Amino acid sequence: MSETKCRRTTSRLWAVAAAMLFAPAAGGWSDTVDVSTEIPVLSAEIPVAVTDGRLPLSLEDAIHIALERNLGLIVRRYNEKENRLNLSGAHGIYDLLGTADLNAFDETTPSASNLDGADIQTTEGQSWNFGLSRLLATGASVSLDFDTSRRETNSTFSTLNPSYRSDFDLSIRQPLLKGLGKRITERNILVAQTNLEITRESFSQQVSSTIQQVVNAYWALVGNRNGLTVAERSLSLAEQLHEQNKIRVEVGTLAPLELVQSEAGIATRKEAIIRQRAAVGDAEDTLRQLLNLDRTSLWDTAIETTTEAGVPERTVVNLEAAIEAALQDRPELTSQRLALDNLEVDVEYFDNQRLPQLDFTARYGFNGLGGPVTERDFFTGEILFQAPGDYGDALSQITDGEFAGWSVGLNLSYPFQNRTAEAQSARAEVVLERGRAELRELELQVVTEVRRAARALETSGQQIDSAAVSRRLAERNLEAEQKRYDNGLSTSYRVLEIQRDLTDAEIREIAAVYGYQTALAELQRATASLNEESGVAIVTAGDD
């Protein structure tokens, strides 16, 4: 191969690399995507078809697939559903409770008096009791009870035999100190509601984390692929030099030792290609894992990335505004603030539990009694009067409201030492203060992350400029050294060394370009804007 042709080939290879590296930056998202907290039904199919044995995948497609299939997000979806069910269950304190008791008895006792008319007294009967009760938001419990019974005895002087008794009562028990108030009554509901909100913030955080991981993995794959191209181009340059050396050795203008050096250069570059191919495979597997691709059909299919980073437009960061946005919107901080709400509910609840138990009770109801009437002479036992009667008599007395009754009362109980309640209240205060300290620590951590991310983005932009200059200088240095070599003023070792310098400079430039993309994603995550910037809207599933 002639020297002129060699330089032309080299120039074309550099042009191809520049075209890949400096392609126009990827545009914004074509549309938005709704991400639901509802658990998806996954299938082996994905919205991108395999073409010619390769899976073409844009960055936008990768993010959308991950948001639907990523296992980390699916786990968070299960957590969200679990907490929705917990909230639904917590409302069960207001469920209407129905009760029913059915009893029968038969007793035999010695007669206590000759007036009983028998040496052995027998009593048998049945009872039916039905009730409805429920809890009120004030902490009161209200119950409606209907009790009825039938009693029959062999006692001669029992006027009603069998006798039927019915009671219909409405009663209430209202705490006046301990247990009083809606927030005390609904403590578990409030905690469950807040836990559901925390879970949804955690889901939003996981969405952002997943997007960032996909962005990093995608650009890592693109970068390693381009790095492989650079390594192959470096091998091509070393092989061209080796061909030149063989021609010069054949014509006697170059010592055979130069062939050993150029062959060593080829072997070194082949090793670099092997390592780079392994890096590409690792990057593909990382992306496949994040996308949760079907292992039986897609894990052996090569991923063809269709989005190039390009030279990005530099983002000017308003640091104070970025920090303010992060402190306002970061899901971790919102979750911690919600957790403090739960702790404040606990403080209020356990402080209430220190109070004495003072309950107001009230009852109002109607009573009825019925059955066949038999009146006897007290001395002789002779029947003086009989009247028919049955269970309906007792019921009619209740429905007519003939016999009413009521009662009111106050019930007080108080443990004098009250150590359990005092300890629980003090512990709740300590846990709340610890939670506030954890919030301050987390806020400081967020501020640090934003500052670090902003600095990393600025540094990445500077590295792009610096790496571009370094790469251009390395190209010129190689051209100059190639001319010196052509004129017999340099050696193969020196040319190979400068070729390696160029390869390193190109790889640094590639890393700088893709590093800027990942640094931008990190800044967006740190300021809680990555979901919005990626066109993602989170849709929460309806409460059960």
Image (cartoon, rainbow, N blue to C red):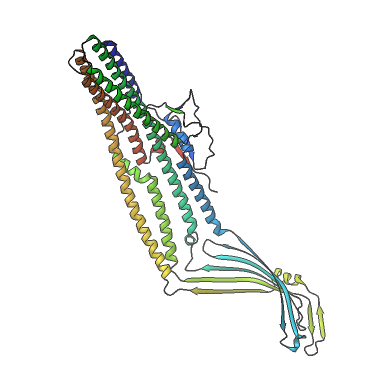
State the residue in front, 249 or 427: 249
State the residue in front, 278 or 123: 278
Q: Is residue 260 above or below residue 200?
A: above
Image quarter where the N terminus lies is top left
Q: Is residue 199 above or below residue 69?
A: below
Instruction: Give the residue at the far left of this rendering.
Output: 489
Q: Does any portion of residue 96 appear in the rendered image?
A: yes
Instruction: Give the residue at the far front of this rendering.
Output: 256
Q: Position of residue 248 (x, y in %)?
A: 24, 12
Q: Is residue 278 above or below residue 88?
A: above
Q: Does any portion of residue 219 appear in the rendered image?
A: no
Instruction: Report the label total.
Output: 0
Q: Position of residue 18 (x, y in %)?
A: 32, 21
State the residue in front, 496 or 297: 496
Q: Quadrant of residue 469?
A: top left
Instruction: Give the residue at the far bottom of this rendering.
Output: 379
Q: Position of residue 35 (x, y in %)?
A: 48, 39
Residue at 33 percent of width and 45 percent of height: 446
Residue at 52 percent of width and 61 percent of height: 137
Residue at 53 percent of width and 48 percent of height: 543
Q: Quadrant of residue 424?
A: bottom left
Q: Position of residue 401 (x, y in %)?
A: 69, 71
The reply, left or right, for residue 78 in relation to residue 405 is left
Q: Is residue 324 above or below residue 378?
A: above
